[in-house]
Amino acid sequence: MNVRVFPYDIMERKKAGVIMYWTLVICLIIVAVVLLLAVVTTSKAYGYKHTVDPLPEERGDKQQTGPKQPQ
């Protein structure tokens, strides 16, 4: 098997390899940024202080009134 390798083919392969590695680097940077944003957002969500409205004071035996109805 005598295969001739032209210099042009070698250059094209090198260019394709360089493009492949640059694409890989860019994809890894995007993944790192998305992961960082997810961690920061989750951290802020856990740090949020939830509050609950206090219960209205009970009025003896009377039933508590609901929201005002239009008359």
Image: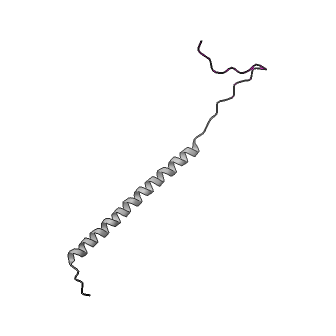
- The residue located at (24%, 87%) in the rendering is 2
Q: Taking 48 as reference, is 55 above or below it?
A: above
Residue 65 point in image, percent of width and height: 68, 20
- The residue located at (35%, 66%) in the rendering is 21
Q: Residue furthest top?
A: 71
Residue 54 point in image, percent of width and height: 67, 29
- The residue located at (51%, 51%) in the rendering is 39
- In the displayed structure image, the side of residue 18 where residue 38 appears, left or right: right
Q: Residue furthest right?
A: 61
Q: Identify which residue, 43 or 17, lies in the foreground.
A: 17
Q: Quadrant of the N terminus?
A: bottom left
- The residue located at (27%, 69%) in the rendering is 15
Image quadrant where residue 67 sits? top right
Q: Identify which residue, 19 or 68, lies in the foreground.
A: 68
Residue 12 point in image, percent of width and height: 25, 71
Magenta-colored span: 55-71
Q: Taking 6 as reference, is 61 above or below it?
A: above
Q: Residue furthest bottom?
A: 1
Q: Assess whether residue 68 is covered by the magenta stretch.
A: yes
Image quadrant where residue 63 sits? top right
- In the displayed structure image, the side of residue 51 where residue 5 appears, left or right: left
Prevailing secondary structure class for the magenta stretch in the rendered image: loop
- In the displayed structure image, the side of residue 28 where residue 69 appears, left or right: right
Q: How is the image coloured?
A: one colour
Q: Assess whether residue 34 is covered by the magenta stretch.
A: no
Residue 68 point in image, percent of width and height: 62, 17
Q: Identify which residue, 60 or 67, lies in the foreground.
A: 67
Q: Taking 68 as reference, is 44 above or below it?
A: below
Q: Quadrant of the C terminus?
A: top right
